[in-house]
Image (tube, rainbow, N blue to C red):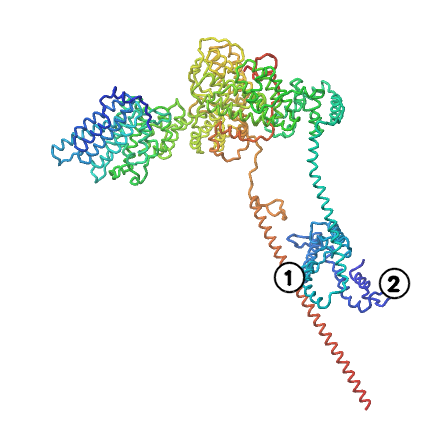
Amino acid sequence: MPKRKSSDSPKSKKAKTGPSLPSIAEIETLEEQVIESSQYNTLVTLLSHYGKSIEHLKLKADKEAEIISRKLTVSLFKCFQKLFKDGLLVNRKHFEEKKSLIIKWLVDKYDTYKTNLFDLIQSKLSFKASVQLDALDIVLRLVKLELEYMGNSKDGFFGNIIYSRLIKALLLSENGEILPDGTSDDFIILEFLDTFKANWDLQAYSVNNLSELLVEWNNIKLKEELRRVYSNFFTLMKNQLLFNDELEELPKWISTPLPASAYKPNHFKGNFQRCFITILSYPLTTSQYKATLLVLHKRIIPYMIQPQSLMDFLTECYEISDDSTIPILALNSLYELMKKFNLEYPDFYTKLYSLLTPELLYSRYRSRFFRLCDLFLTSTHLSANLVASFIKKLARLSLSSTASGVVIVIPFIYNLLKRHPSCMIMVHNANPLADYQDPFINSEPNPLFTKAIGSSLWELESLMSHYHPNIATLAKIFGEPFRKHSYNMEDFLDWSYITLLDSEKTRRYKSMAALEFEEYNKLFEGGEEAEGSVYAEGWTL
Amino acid sequence: MAGSQLKQLKAALKSQGLIGQTNAKKKNQKSKTPHDTRRDDKHKILGGIRTQFNQFDQRINRTKHDVSIIQGGKFVKMGSKQHNDATRTHSAVQKNMKMQYDLEKKTKGKTGGLQDRRFGENNKHLSAEEKMLERFTRERQVSSKKRNVFALGSDDEDDDEDDDGGFTLTHSGKALTLDDEDTLGDSTTRYVDEDQMEEGPVRKKTKAEVMKEVIAKAKFYKKQRQQEFQKSQTNIEDLDEDFGDIMEEMGNIKAPAAPKFSTKTDEEREYDNKVRELTYDRRAVPADRTKTEEEIQKEHDEKMKKLETDRLNRMNGVDMDRAATGDDLDDEFWAGSDEEEGFAIDGEEQDDAEESGSGEEEGEEGLTSTKFGRTLARKPQVSMPANHEEFIQSLHAIEIEKQPSYINKIIETYRPNLAQGNKERMNVFVGILFQHILHLTQEEKPESQQLIEKLIKIVKKLAEAYNEVLVENVREEINQIQDRIVDSEGILLKRDLVFFVLVGYLFSTSDHYHLIVTPTLILMNEVLSKLTYTLKVSLQRIAQGTFIADQLLNYQKFSKRYSPELVNFVEKSLLLLIPEPTKIGTASKLLSTNNIINSNLNLAKTQKYKDTKQPISISDLVKEKPTIEFRYQILLKLLSLVDRITGVWKDQSSLIEIIDPFIVIVKHLVKYDSSSSSELLNKLVKLQTNATKDRKPLALQNHRALAIATFAPKFEENFNPDKKSYDINRERQEVNKMKNQLKKERKATLKDIRQETRFVAGERILEKKQMYEQYHKKMANIVNSISTIEGAEKNQYEREKKMRKNKK
């Protein structure tokens, strides 16, 4: 439920600020006039009241005014529903001139009503008002009404114009903030999402003709606005769509059949793709990039007709260097494209090599990266130079990595060495030159030219004396015969300090915990006795 | 017996008197058997001789030539020991089968039989001895029950049944008793009475009737006696019951008149008490010789040496027998506290000497040796707190200087050997003490440091005896710190920082694996790694990290284990603090990051600061103190950490990579503040050049070359037919072995069954043959006898005929 600010003594407020707003009883009589006695001129009064109440709500958090505007929304809906029933909103050729004039006039009023509704949905009121949700509800019902009375029932019809206006209003809605996960917390959109998720026709028509609009916005709107649009759009689209092979079977919002074009999968895919390509070219925030990339390969690529066209976007993401996580995430979708569409990426391994930064092993997505990296380095036909560079670089990174990072790196290197025995010289070089110098060039970006194959993995030797006993033992495999075929990486990818600690906590007390036998006179420096050995030198309490 | 078989046979036959001079009279022969019977026995004797002489089954055959036969699936040399064994067992089996067969034949078609009811006859678990004993006692019991049937005075009613010595007369399964006789008699008496009425009233009593009367009388008197006895008994019991009440009454009445049992004075009584106490004392034993200074020193050195080797073993992960140290309870803790700190451990040796006595004695002795001469009134009156709050309450009243001695008093009063349950109380108390130290660190009092120093020493002494409970407490604290790290993203409390120091102070941090130290290490490194994770970089975070890094290096002072997070942290923090880090240029040599950024913590490049050389206070680490001086202080501390890192890990082969970034950073820093860092830079550069010169590539795979596994060789060089299988596939070999075994067993069983049926069949044929033979013999005898009679008759007839003819 939307939160409302409690307003003190609404009566007095109304008297002060909204003198022109009618009471509920007045609205009811006006409504009656329209419905019972066909006094269509009262529609004008009602609409003007409606417009005023909306303006008023934009300025003030007035609970009383909200109730009135809600009443107005419903009353007007009832009026127009009646008009639809009477056939007074659809112009037909055979009508007399006078009647068509009236109809034209009524349609104009109906348009005003709709504009008001979309205004309610789109603009940010001074508080989260239920009237906005009412408006959303009414619009959705109007979609049905228009279909019933305006459409020619033969070949299927969908209230395209009003629905695309609704989508537009929703996308432009200013009610939400961009959350850290890239989505919006717009309550109207979230409300709409429930209906949207369950109905295929709503999903299919949401992307109809949207791309032109998006392009247009891209040119005229400000950065912040575009980001908001994206977050609204992403909120709608980030969930699994209903799209599948049997489009006819899917649940729908309207009861009548849809036009034939809605049942062509490629039609939808094309629209969807165009929208996405356009909207992804917006200037996005880092968190939006991350959120999109996280779901891209699963929720978006399947609905595109030519996923290759995402290439530019992904490449762009992959090249972003100020945040190391975005390229890692882009890697997943890139791999998907490469696998399915035989995409070629120039200097792929150079780029992959450049992802091996010190931050990588501290990143939350390290397991994702190593899963893929394992895949990319599976081939035994890769050059030894390249694999050696990866090995050496990873070893170098492990020298300043977290314990969980080290846990990944050790079996990873083992597997690589096992797969590429020519790299074994890095752990065992029995006959070095007399004046041996480490040839590895750390700053070289191309993994083919780092000369890592001539280097040695001293870093791993250091890890053999890692502070964690299990990791130290694990690192000692490099000093033992390589008998094991390979390590299953999944066992090592998802460790963290918490899991490491948990496995320590459960250990049983078996024998006495060994005590320090060396004696110190004092724990800390300072105090009265200045003499004697101190345990924590350089610190006082 | 000697000679050839023939000779032996002759001799045997002769000795049995079957051949040779049959009528020759032997000396002193009593000729038990007449000739006729001997003839009957002849067959038996001959059979005996035959079996005796058929020695193929019993004798070892010596063969002239080596002949091997297959027996039991094996090649066996004829006449060898195995062969003979086999034949022997074979004959044994035959004999066994025969016995079995005979037995079965005997019992075939028969039911019932005799059941052996003797005690324990079928009980295998009883030895012959036990059986005999039990039987004997039973016999005795039975005989003891048997008493003279005619003893008049002593037959109780209870004994009536036993009168006849266990025999009872029965009729159709029911026991006939005397009562039955009576009832039976009753029914008949009426009938008899009528007869008597008719015949006449007077009848002379039979002897039985008289006897019965006598018995009845005797019984009556006996019953009377018993009743009287019973009566008196109940009377006595009633009196006894009331006795208590009466005594109570009497006691009430005579309360004021207290009897004077002793006329001793208090002094005398005390003396008596002391004397009594002394009797419980152990006799004085000659004390150990007082050790000389050198000896004490030597022992101490040895002790230290042992501890050192133990530590090395633990560090290298060698499993040690820790059970030995479990007994090193420091019972003499109080006495030892007067000694110098370094010798506190020596208390154990005295214990070892005393441990010869039982635990009870030891406790007693400990009590008297420390308390002798003290009166009970001087015993410190302290109470054991049940929880930490109570403890703090009780400490409120005591001055801070006296708190350690108060705690010592508690420890002394509740030493585990003084009373039952003290051990548990002390367990709780050690936990409380540990908590209290951490609690004290939170208080901002100047004197609390002194107090903590003293308390931690007490805890350290208790750590050995109350190890488990201390470990539990420390682990609990670790859990709490972990929670705090997660909640506050790595900002810790003062007590947590002190906790890390305490762990290092109390426990052996060099161990390969340690129940406490390992999780603590994980915790500390987690805190250090948080600096990278978090976006909110604050001086407080860096300062706390610096402290933890310093402690980490303290931990690794001995074992020199590598901690990547520490390197990362120091590097990162330096970059955050030094002036103008972006001017370093390339980041390719850095381990912690790829792009250097400025932070709001970087020192200004122009400002000069003074090195105060003062120790940093931990209290400053937990509060925000963004003064420039403090920043500089932390920077200096970090530089000293770099120095320590190079010291601790100077033997690491990747030292070059580790100190590379530090060189870059320090070189940069020298431009701004040469006083603090130029010396360090020189040292680092020198170290690196040396390391680069010395470093050789790794050769980790220097293993003995592994032989290539060979599969199924065509020829076996030393083929051994006895070896069952040369299969290298172990599993298959096992399976085949099992299969063979099964086959063999099956065969053997079938063989056994066949042998048995064959044997039975043979026996049957033999029996039938015997039967037929007997029959034929019998018939022949009959025919013979008939024909003899017939012949005789005929002869007689002929004779008669002749006679008659002659007469004529």
Asked which secondary structure carries label 2, the reply is loop
Residue ID for mark 2: B28
The image quadrant that residue B387 belongs to is top right
The extreme left residue here reads A97
Q: Which amino acid does label 2 sit on?
A: Asn
Graded by Cα atoms within 10 Å as few (under 14), some (14 to 19) or many (20 or more), the crowding at tag 1 reads few
User: Mark 1 or 2 closer to N-term?
Assistant: 2
Separation of marks 1 and 2 at Cα, in angstroms:
50 Å
Determine the secondary structure under disc 1: helix
Q: Position of residue B223 (x, y in %)?
A: 73, 51
Residue in the foreground of this view, choosing between B314 and B455: B455
Can you say which quadrant of the picture contains the C terminus of chain A? Answer: top right
Q: Which mark is residue B758?
A: 1
Task: Say which chain tag 2 marks.
Answer: B
Q: In which quarter of the image is the N terminus of chain A?
A: top left
Q: Residues within 10 Å of mark 2 (few under 14, many from 20)?
A: few
Most foreground residue, A133 or B723: A133
Q: Which of B387 and B381 is in front in this view?
A: B381
Amino acid type of the residue that numbered disc 1 sits on in the rendered structure: Arg
**Residue A344: quarter of image:** top left
Residue A200, x across and y down, in percent = 30, 36
